[in-house]
Amino acid sequence: HAVAMYALLPAMEGANLRLLNQAIDEMLQYYQDNTIQLARELRWLGIVLRRADIVSVEEKRQVEERLNMYDDLMEKDPKMQKIRAESEARGEARGEARGEAKGMSRGEVKGLQTAILVIVKGRFPSLFKAAKQVVKNVSTVEELSTLLAKVAAAPDEIAARSLLIPNND
C-alpha cells in the first residue's frame, strides 16, 4: 500500500482493471484532504496508463473513463492552470508575430472582426453564432476587409448566409 507509487502501477507486471480501480479508490481515500496532490497523482496514473502495454485496451478505456470523472480536479490544479496560461500566451505571441510579419496589427484584425459581428448582429441576428465562428478563423486584414464589405452589402439574410456558411444547400 505505497500510495505514492500507485501512479506507476499501469506499467507494472500484473496490472489490470481490478487492481487499478482499487488503487484509485485508495488514492481517493489517502488524498481526501489534499485535492491538488490527488489531481497530480491521478494525472500521472493516466499518463503512465496511456504509455503502458501491460493493461489491455479495453481495461485502459475503462480506467480512463473513471479518471475522466476527476478532470475538474486537474483543471483546478495550480500547476495545470499555469501550464495552460503559458501555452495560451505563447500561442497569442506567435499569432501576433505572424500578423505583424504580414503587416497587420492585432488591433486591426480585432477591429474588423468586431465590425463584422456588429453588422451581422444588427442585420442578421440568426447568423450571429455562425459569424463568430467565421471571423475567429479569419486572421488576415484583406480577408476580413472583403468579408466586411460583402456582409455590409448583403441584400438579405440568404445572401449573408451564403457568405458565412459556405456549401449551405
Image (tube, rainbow, N blue to C red):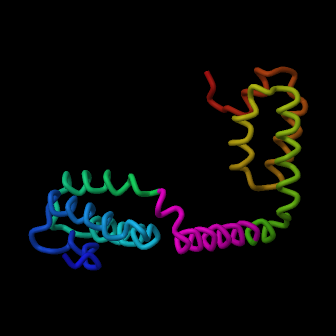
Residue furthest left as drawn: 14
- Which residue occupies 21% across, 72% down? 9
> Looking at the image, is 93 positioned above or below residue 123?
below
**Closest to the observer: 63 or 101?**
63
- Which residue occupies 34% across, 69% down? 47
Instruction: Tell me the quarter of the image containing the C terminus.
Output: top right
Quarter where residue 10 is shown: bottom left
Is 134 covered by the magenta stretch? Answer: no
**Closest to the observer: 148 or 53?**
53
Q: Is residue 70 left or right of residue 15?
A: right
**Closest to the observer: 115 or 44?**
44
- Which residue occupies 82% across, 41% down? 147
Q: Position of residue 67 (x, y in %)?
A: 34, 57
Q: Which residues are magenta?
A: 72-96
Is 92 covered by the magenta stretch? Answer: yes
Instruction: Tell me the quarter of the image containing the N terminus.
Output: bottom left
> Looking at the image, is 82 positioned above or below residue 76?
below
Q: Is residue 33 left or right of residue 11?
A: right
Q: Is residue 19 left or right of residue 85?
A: left
Q: How many marks?
A: 0
Q: Position of residue 45 (x, y in %)?
A: 31, 69
**Closest to the observer: 146 or 87?**
87
Quarter where residue 150 is shown: top right
- Which residue occupies 15% across, 58% down? 18
> What main secondary structure does the magenta stretch of the protein show?
helix
> Looking at the image, is 23 positioned above or below residue 5?
above
